[in-house]
Amino acid sequence: MTDNQISMTRLAPKTFQLVEIKWNRQESNGYYRIGLTCDAAYIHAVPGQFVTLHLPGTLTPLLRRPFSIHRLIRENGRVVGIEILYKVVGGFTEKLIRVSPGDPVDLLGPIGQGFTVSGEFRKPAFVGGGIGVAPLVFLADALMESGLDPSGAVVFLGGRTTGDILCANIFRSHGLSVAIATDDGSLGEKGLVTRPLEHWLTSNRPDIIYSCGPMPMLRSVAKIARKNSLPCEVSIETVMACGLGACLGCAVNKNDISGKYQHVCIDGPVFDPSVTVF
Ligand SMILES: Cc1cc2nc3c(=O)[nH]c(=O)nc-3n(C[C@H](O)[C@H](O)[C@H](O)COP(=O)(O)OP(=O)(O)OC[C@H]3O[C@@H](n4cnc5c(N)ncnc54)[C@H](O)[C@@H]3O)c2cc1C
Ligand code: FES
C-alpha cells in the first residue's frame, strides 16, 4: 500500500448520519448527557474514539464539534445508540442543551484511535479531570466486559468543585474504587487529583494509567507515569477544525528527532505520552 493509499484509508471510512436525539438531560450544573441513535456498526467503537456533531439548519458554529463516546446504548444486546456527556462552554453546546427527543442531529464517527482494551492490563488506574471522565466510563464498561476484576482498579476523579465530579457512581456500580479530589475541598481531598494518585502509587503498582482531562493534568499524569516506569495512555482534547486529518488544526509533535507531527483527530486522540509531545 502506498503512503497516499494509507492516508486515504485514514480519511475515508467514517459515515455521516442524520440521527435522532433519544434524550438530553441535565447531569449537574453546566453538564448534560445526550443519547443519540446510531447504526449497529458502533458496536465496533473503541473507548477513546469520538464523534463530531452538527445541528441541521444551523449556520453557526460552522465547524462540527468533537465529543467522546461516553457510553454505548444497548437494547436486547444490540447497540442502538451512543451517549455523550457534555459541558456547556460556548456556541454549540449552548444550542445543544435546547434540542429535544426526536430532533435530528448530524453525526460523524466513530473517529480516531482509542485506548488499548486488553486482558493484559489487570490492574489499571484511571485519572479523569472534569469532563475528561467522559471516555473513561466507556473504557471501564469495555474493560469490565472483557473480564476485568474491579478489585485491583482505582479511579481518580478531579475537578474544581463538587459539581465537576461526574460519574463516580457509575464506576462504583462496576465495583471500582473511586478517589476524589477537588480544588476547593468541597468533595474528597482538597487539591489536585494527582496528589491522591501519587500517594496511592507509593504502595500500589497499576499495570497502566489511563487518563483524560485538561492538558496540565495530563502532563502531570504523564510525568508521574514516567517517574514510576508505568505504561500510560492519555486522551488529548485539542481544538479541532476538520476532525478528519485534512487540515493541521490539531497537530502535535512526535517526541523524536524526526520533526514529524501527528494529527490528534486521526492519530489520536489517545496517545502514549512517551512518544508524543503535548
Ligand atoms: C477528541 C475530543 C473529545 C472531546 N470530548 C468531549 C466530551 O466528551 N464532552 C465535552 O463536553 N467536550 C468534549 N470535547 C470538547 C468539545 O469539543 C468542546 O467543548 C466543544 O467543541 C465546544 O464547542 P462550543 O461551540 O460550545 O464552544 P466554543 O465557543 O467553541 O468554545 C468555548 C470555549 O471552550 C474552549 N474550547 C473549545 N474546544 C475546546 C477543547 N477541545 N478543549 C478545551 N477547550 C476548548 C474554547 O477555546 C473557548 O474558550 C472534546 C474535544 C475533543 C478534541
Ligand atoms: S482537525 Fe483537521 S487535521 Fe485534525
Image (cartoon, rainbow, N blue to C red):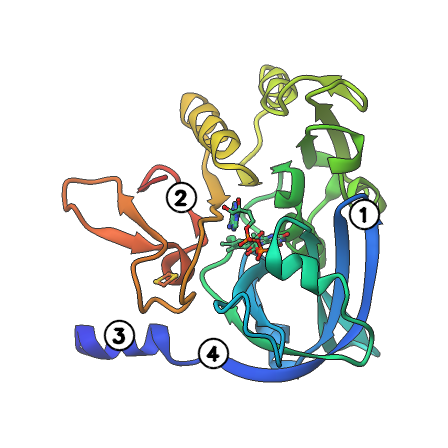
Q: Measuring 69% from the left and 33% from the top, which residue is drawn there?
A: 157
Q: Residues within 10 Å of mark 1 (few under 14, many from 20)?
A: few
Kindly report which numbered mark, 4 or 1, lies closer to the viewer in this rendering. Answer: 4
**Amino acid marked by disc 3:** Ile
Quadrant location, the C terminus: top left
Q: Is residue 122 visible?
A: yes
Q: Residues within 10 Å of mark 3 (few under 14, many from 20)?
A: few
Q: Residues within 10 Å of mark 4 (few under 14, many from 20)?
A: some
Quadrant location, the N terminus: bottom left
In this view, 124 is above or below 184: below
Residue 20: give x, y in percent of width and height: 73, 80
Report the Cα–Cα distance between label 2 and label 3.
Answer: 21 Å
Q: Which residue is mark 3?
A: 6
Q: Earlier in the sequence, mark 2 or mark 1?
A: 1
Report the Cα–Cα distance between label 1 and label 3.
Answer: 39 Å
Residue 258: give x, y in percent of width and height: 14, 46
In this view, 244 is above or below 190: below
Which type of secondary structure does the marked residue at label 3 adopt?
Answer: helix
Q: Which residue is mark 2?
A: 272
Q: Which residue is mark 4?
A: 14
In this view, the residue farthest toward the front is 59
Which type of secondary structure does the marked residue at label 1 adopt?
Answer: helix
The numbered disc on residue 170 is 1
> Is mark 4 in CB contact (under 8 Å) with mark 1?
no
> Is mark 1 in CB contact (under 8 Å) with mark 3?
no
